[in-house]
Amino acid sequence: MESLPHDNSIEALWRPENRTGILKFASLRQGSLEPRNTMRIVILVLSFLFVIAPAQAADCNAPAAAGVDWQRCYMDGRGFIDSTLSGSRLRETSFQRSDLSGADLRRVDGYRARFVSTRMRGTKLDDGQFSDADFTKADLAGASLARADLRRARFFHASLRGADLTGAKTQGAEMLGADLSGALWTDGVRRCAEGSIGQCN
């Protein structure tokens, strides 16, 4: 009978040579299990292979670079000034109190990423996916968020002074206390007046 890999790390289970063995193991067990239990095993195996394992493939120790996979990594309190992270996978990644000033985050997948109290002055976030992200108290002065998906993102007391929001999707975004003074609004025409707090006046 096929056996599971001796190396029980998630990375080992996800290797192509081991995936086949796991599936064979599940199929061989069908003859000794009731149909409903067999189905449970198959569902569990498939859930692991296609949901849990891919999420663990992120390399949190990889250096900052375009296309890096830092999904669910903790990058709190670090410096990434002027770094190039364009096209990177940053889903649910935490950058709390980090410095991303001038960094290139264009076209990144930052769904539910956390940028709480993060310094992001002049950062480029154009065409990025930041729905449900948390920018509470972040400093985004002069940042470019053109065409970014900011739906349901939180900008509580964040600074968006002079930021470019042209074409950004802001449906459901929460901007309580956010400073929008001088920001270019989503229509690409209106410039928010000085003292615009929580909304573009």
Image (tube, rainbow, N blue to C red):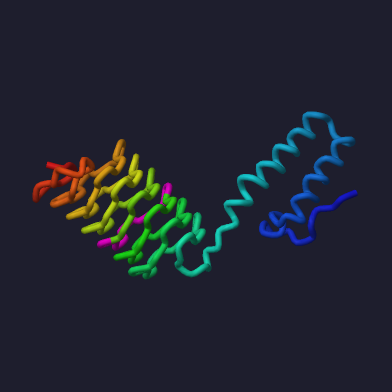
* Magenta segment includes 23: no
Q: Single out the residue that lies furthest toward the front.
A: 189
Main SS class of the magenta portion in the image: loop
Up-down relation of residue 107 to residue 85 (above or below): above
At x 14%, y 43%, the residue is 190
Closest to the observer, 5 or 110: 110
Q: Position of residue 115 (x, y in %)?
A: 35, 56
Up-down relation of residue 56 to residue 173 (above or below): below
Instruction: Count all numbered tags in the image, as a single digit.
Output: 0
Q: Position of residue 69 (x, y in %)?
A: 51, 59
At x 24%, y 53%, the residue is 158
Query: Which quadrant would the C terminus be assigned to in this image?
Result: top left
Residue 62 placement, left or right of 161: right
Q: Single out the residue that lies furthest toward the top.
A: 35
Q: Single out the residue that lies furthest toward the left.
A: 194
Residue 18 placement, left or right of 177: right
- The stretch of residues the image draws in magenta is 111-122
At x 21%, y 40%, the residue is 187
Closest to the observer, 38 or 83: 83
Residue 182 placement, left or right of 15: left
Closest to the observer, 94 or 105: 105
Residue 47 placement, left or right of 145: right
* Magenta segment includes 114: yes
At x 42%, y 51%, the residue is 110
